[in-house]
Amino acid sequence: MKVVVLTAVWCHACLFMKKTFKTFEQNHPEWSFQFLDVDLDAEAECYSLGKVLPVLIFLKDGQEVHRIQGEKTLDDLERESNHAF
Amino acid sequence: MVYLDYSATTPLDPRVAEAWFNSEKNFFANANSSHALGVLAKQENNRHLETLASIFHVLPSELILTSSAVEANNFAIKGLAMKYPDKRHVITSVYEHASLIAALASFGNSLEVETVNLKRDGTYDLAHLKSLIRPDTLVVSLVAVDSETGLKQPVEAVGLLCHQLGVYFHCDATQAYGKTKISFDSMDLVSLSAHKIYGPKGVGMLIKKKSVGLVPLMHGGHSFTPFRASTPANSLLAAFTKAVELADEEFEARNRKVSDLRAYLKAQLSENPNILINSSELSIPQIFNVSILNTKPEEGVKYFSEHGIYLSSKSACSGEEDLSKSVLALTGDHARAISSYRISLSHLSTIEDMDHFVTWAKELAKS
């Protein structure tokens, strides 16, 4: 599983979730994480995004299988990802 | 046209434009030049800096002219972080401007950022702030007025607390200056902008108290200050100074007019069950935030625009589409937080403007 984390430097929720992302990544060594800035990283254009950031896109064999968006706690991320998988 | 977005930006005051033009015409020389015209320009600049210093109760050497408040916010955070690399902890709030957030985020994981809790009335919880401050705290950076609800924060008290605990305090006073009484005495760094007070876009200011160390972002020659290189922008300084002088001299008259308009607007809207007023008695009179229940602000802003009314909804990216964190913090009501509009008033606004807005707001509330 690959998890793409899309953020922006001007996004409050993205800044306040930095620690959460770090712990979430540490909790899931079986997944590979990629962090992309929606304004600065050209690769971010591959993903269709609304206005709400951050967005976590879960990819299996290159296909999107789940998406989490908006400000979340670590518990939210774990619960929502557990529920999906 | 009914312009109700004065907190986004203000039109240029003709008297400010005149000051700008006078400077361009009569004091255009490079103030770093040693010839007579350069000396004249420098004298004029010094006169402006002394005027500003007198109004702000600081030293002329503590004023750094910037291109904007965005630059001032970036300069405060980045300049401190580079100067004090051992201090990696920053305290801020959910109310901050995107430029402050972006400046912090630009350090990636090398800065630890915490947010101060809010009290029930939406103001900073100073006891919590005190508990967050640590020996490695680089700066407490808090906005003076929330740009969405107009809530005024106790930033002077924050400054005193920071001084007691030996921590720098940076205050983004962009939405506050000229609209509410604010003292910079207890603040180490203050960000300001000209275009929020009827000055031109492209000029702002960072007040940096003498005791504060900063690494400059712009290196080059000496300008108004060694902390920001560039050829001195004489006319922008003249325009900024005029805008500040007018904001200072006309403060009471402007605020009285705006307070009257706000009271009128409140009276006109308060009996409508679908229109709820979010701004509180702690809000500055110029910012009046309302929720029009069961409407989507993004569509509502377009609706008002079609009727010749120009206003704002929340700023982008709050973690949930259309949700205003500021309104949620102030009201605790999700329905209000996803249907809020910011009406920002000016001494240039009129009763007719209010009536026009009220008519279409009530119409929208019916739908």
Image (cartoon, coloured by chain):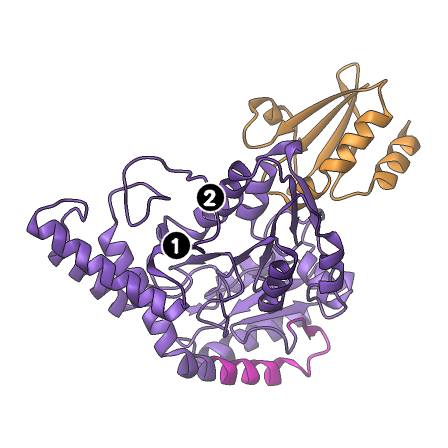
Chain colours: A orange, B purple
Tag count: 2
Residue depicted at x 67% and y 71%? B278
What residue does disc 2 label?
A: B214
Above-or-below relation of B213 to B184 = above
Instruction: Identify the residue shown where x is 51% and y is 57%.
Output: B188
Residue, far left: B36
Residue at disc 2, secondary structure:
loop
Please state the extent of the stretch shown in magenta in the rendering: B258-279
Rendering coords of residue B135 (x, y %): 69, 46
- Ranked by sequence position, the earlier of labels 1 and 2 is 1
Amino acid residing under circle 2: Leu
Q: Secondary structure at mark 1?
A: strand
Instruction: Residue B228 in the image: state x and y as whole percent.
Output: 35, 43
Q: Is residue B352 left or right of residue A25?
A: left
Instruction: Indicate yes or no whether the magenta region holds residue B252.
Output: no
Is the C terminus of chain B in the top left, top right, bottom left or bottom right quadrant? bottom right
Mark pair 1, 2: CA separation:
17 Å
In the rendered image, is residue B269 in sight? Answer: yes
**Quadrant of the image containing the N terminus of chain B:** bottom left
Is B67 placed left or right of B255 in the picture? left
Q: Quadrant of residue B247?
A: bottom left
Using the image, name the chain to which the residue with label 2 belongs. B
Q: Is residue B131 left or right of residue B157?
A: right
Residue B119: quarter of image: bottom right
- Crowding around mark 2 (Cα neighbors within 10 Å: few <14, some 14 to 19, many 20+) is some
Query: Magenta stretch: residue B267 in it?
Result: yes
**CB of mark 1 within 8 Å of CB of mark 2?**
no
Q: Which residue is mark 1?
A: B204
**One can see residue B24 in this view:** no
